[in-house]
Image: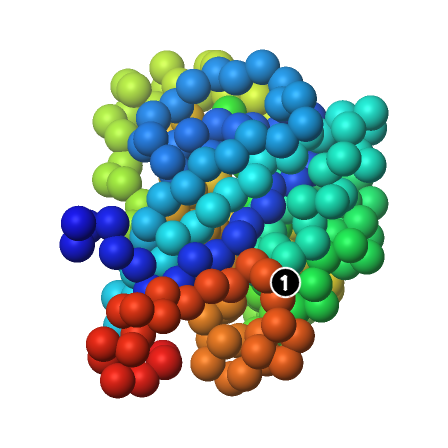
Amino acid sequence: MESLSWDYILKYVLLGDSATGKSSLLIRLTDDRFDLTGPTLGVEFGSRIISVGNEGKRVKVQCWDTAGTESFRSITRSYFRGAAGALLVYDVTRRESFDHVTSWLEDLRKYADENVSIILVANKVDLCSSSPEPLPSIQYGHPFPAPDTPLNTSSSRSPSPSPSPAPATTATAQTKDLRPRQVSTMEGALFAKQHGLLYVETSAKEGWGVNDAFEWTAREVLEKVRKGEMERRKPGGVKLNETRQNKGGRCC
């Protein structure tokens, strides 16, 4: 079927502490629904075809959702090998999950391929806000704002449009249930910039930013393919649909 055709297959891994919402992000991507899940034991798998970039390349992302508990860490590391993309997830309401991001990143850079594209995912923002916040333009490749210059909070990577503001009465009711945010947008974005990562804020429950997390990572992977960076390393996480590409008369 044409709807199932693809140009590339990319291997993704989701990693981070337990209970940061990795499984819920994967379910939102594959089934477009929210589900409260129990702890992942070992790894879980899901896939979906997404359209990437202005050319509309059809990319099948095959995602391995890894356990966040220490007892499974030696097992989950083996899934890092050959990954083209990685979602490094933390919970904005749990400071310790952000503090552990450095350790997860070290594991990923030790066991994954050198050219793996990594996006830092600040998840569960719906617990702290009634609508998604604009992202600061301080990701890598963009300069830091001057100390006395107002921060430009327009997104540098075209996130999904923010929904219309809710009526005041609804917003007031929702505010009563909001939790304090323990990791600010600025802190997360600065960490991502300093370590050469993409950055996105998501809510698996509301669907905010979930598609962006997977698509932005895929865009970066395909850009590396275009430049020949992935070919030099021969990673197992990128596969072309050779039948389709040959019909077009060229590779990519």
- Tell me which colouring the rendered structure shows: rainbow
Badge 1: how crowded within 10 Å, few (<14), some, or many (20+)?
many
Residue at image coords 50%, 76% = 225
With 189 as the anchor, is 168 left or right in this view? Answer: left
185 or 211: which is nearer to us?
A: 211
Farthest residue, direction left:
2
In this rendering, is residue 228 above or below 13?
below
Residue 43 in the image: state x and y as whole percent: 62, 31
Picture quadrant of residue 33: top left
- Element type at mark 1: loop
Asked whether residue 243 appears in the rendered view, the answer is: yes
In this rendering, is residue 3 above or below 27?
below
Residue 194 in the image: state x and y as whole percent: 72, 64
Q: Which residue position holds label 1?
A: 116
Picture quadrant of residue 40: top right
Residue 117 in the image: state x and y as whole percent: 59, 62
21 or 42: which is nearer to us?
A: 42
With 240 as the anchor, is 79 left or right in this view? Answer: right
Q: How many marks?
A: 1
- Where is the C terminus found, in terms of image quarters? bottom left
With 113 as the anchor, is 133 left or right in this view? Answer: left
Residue at image coords 36%, 65% = 241
With 153 as the anchor, is 65 left or right in this view? Answer: right
204 or 175: which is nearer to us?
A: 204
Asked whether residue 156 appears in the rendered view, the answer is: no
Residue at image coords 41%, 67% = 240
159 or 40: which is nearer to us?
A: 40
Residue at image coords 56%, 59% = 237
Residue type at mark 1: give it. Answer: Val
